[in-house]
Every structure is written in C-alpha cells, then in structure tokens.
Image (cartoon, rainbow, N blue to C red):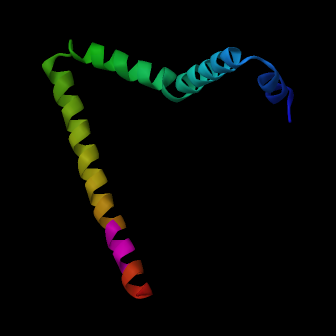
Amino acid sequence: MDYKEKVYFVVPIFIQNAMLSFYGLKLRRERYGKHLINKYKQLLDSQYWNISRLNDFQERVYSLRLYMLSNLFHIIKNIWVIITFKV
C-alpha cells in the first residue's frame, strides 16, 4: 500500500470525498482537456469561414467518409471469411 492509500484511509470521509472529486477532475482534464478545447475553438472559428474554405472542409469530410466506408467493407469482408471458415 503506497502513501496515498494510507492517507486516504486515515482521513475523515468528507476529505476522502474531496480527494476523489479532485481525482475525478484530474481524469476529466486528461481525457477531454486540450483535444476538446481545440475542437470547440475550431467550431467557433468555423462559423466565420468563407465559402471556399467551407467547401474545402466539406470535400475533406466527404473523402474521409468514402475512405472509411471502403475500408469498412474490406474489414467486414475479411471478418466474414474468418467466421465462415471457423464454423
């Protein structure tokens, strides 16, 4: 048992609750911190894009969707082959 666990079990319940709340905030910041903030800033910035930039973004999204769909079909096909041979 490391020192953090020893301290946790010695302190009163309300301090344990506070410790867990701060730990939860730390985890939330690690999970959603910079990435979510950057996406939010991009969203705010995108409302002022001109038509050519918006069209470029839409083309990139469309090409990404096509790429994902073509690879998804390939993956599903390979999984189907594996499943049918095991049965």
| Image quarter of the N terminus | top right
> Which residue lies most toward the front here?
13
Please name the residue shown 40% across and 87% down the image. 87
Dividing the picture into quadrants, the one containing residue 75 is bottom left
Q: Quadrant of residue 55?
A: top left
In the foreground, 11 or 5: 11
**Residue 35 falls within the magenta-colored stretch:** no
Based on the picture, tell me whether residue 77 belongs to the magenta stretch.
yes
Report the residue at 28% width, 44% height from top. 64
Give the side of residue 30 with respect to residue 15, left or right: left
Q: Specify the segment rendered in magenta.
A: 76-81
Most common secondary structure along the magenta stretch: helix
Query: Position of 13 compared to 76: left or right?
Result: right
Q: Nearer the viewer, residue 4 or 40?
A: 4
Image coordinates for residue 17, horizontal then vertical, percent: 64, 20
State whether residue 59 is above or below residue 78: above
Q: Quadrant of residue 69?
A: bottom left
- Percent coordinates x, y for residue 48 in the rendering: 21, 12
Q: Nearer the viewer, residue 58 or 84?
A: 84
Q: Position of residue 22 (x, y in %)?
A: 62, 18
Q: Position of residue 38 (x, y in %)?
A: 42, 20
* Labels in figure, total: 0
| Drawn side of residue 74 relative to residue 12, left or right | left
Q: Residue at x 37, y 23 (%)?
A: 39
Left or right, 13 with reference to 84: right
